[in-house]
Amino acid sequence: MFDEQATTTAEPVTETVRRRRQRKDRKPKPQPRYQVILWNDEDHTYAYVIAMMMQIFGHTAEKGYEIASQVDTDGRAVVLTTTKEHAELKRDQIHAFGKDNLIDGCQGSMWATIEPVE
C-alpha cells in the first residue's frame, strides 16, 4: 500500500542531505594575507628594535638584529605575514611600544604599516 506521508517526509530529508554534501565539497577560501612593514627612522637604536621584536613578535635576539639591520639598510622590513586583523593588532602594538630611552629627544614609537600580499 502507498503511504503518502512517508513520501513527503522523505523528500525534505533527501534535499537536506544533498545540501550538506554540497557544503562539505566546498572548501573555505583562505583569508587574504597581509604584511606588517616596519619603517626606518633615525630616532631608534638597534637595541630598541631588537627588544620590540622580541616582546611583540617573540623573535629571538638574532632575528631582531636581522630585522633592525634590514630596516637600517633598506628603509623597511617585513616583520610578519598574517591575517588582516592580526596584522592590524601587531601594527598597533608597534605604534604603542613607546619611545627609545637610549636616544635623547626621541618622540615616540617607530612607524609601521600593513600591506596586502599580492
Image (cartoon, rainbow, N blue to C red):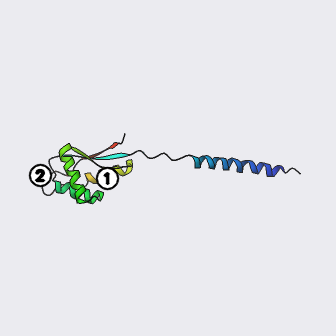
Other-residue count near label 1 (Cα within 10 Å), few / some / many at <14 / 14–19 / ≥20: many
Mark before the other along the chain sequence, 1 or 2:
1
Q: Image point 30% across, 57% down: which residue? A: 57
Look at the image and tell me whether residue 98 can be seen. no
Q: Give how far across and how far down residue 107 sits, in percent.
A: 16, 50
Disc on res. 28 = none
Q: Amino acid at mark 2?
A: Gly
Choose between 70 and 5: the one closer to the eye. 70
Q: Assign a secondary structure to mark 2.
A: loop
Please give left or right for residue 78 compared with residue 72 in the image: right
Look at the image and tell me whether residue 47 can be seen. yes
The residues tagged by marks 1 and 2 sit, at their Cα atoms, a distance apart of 25 Å
Q: Which residue is mark 2?
A: 105
Q: Amino acid at mark 1?
A: Lys
Q: Give how far across and how far down residue 35 sits, in percent.
A: 33, 46
Q: Image point 38% across, 47% down: which residue? A: 84
Instruction: State which quarter of the image contains the C terminus.
Output: top left
Furthest-right residue in view? 1
Q: Give how far across and how far down residue 76 sits, in percent.
A: 23, 44
Q: Which residue is mark 1?
A: 90
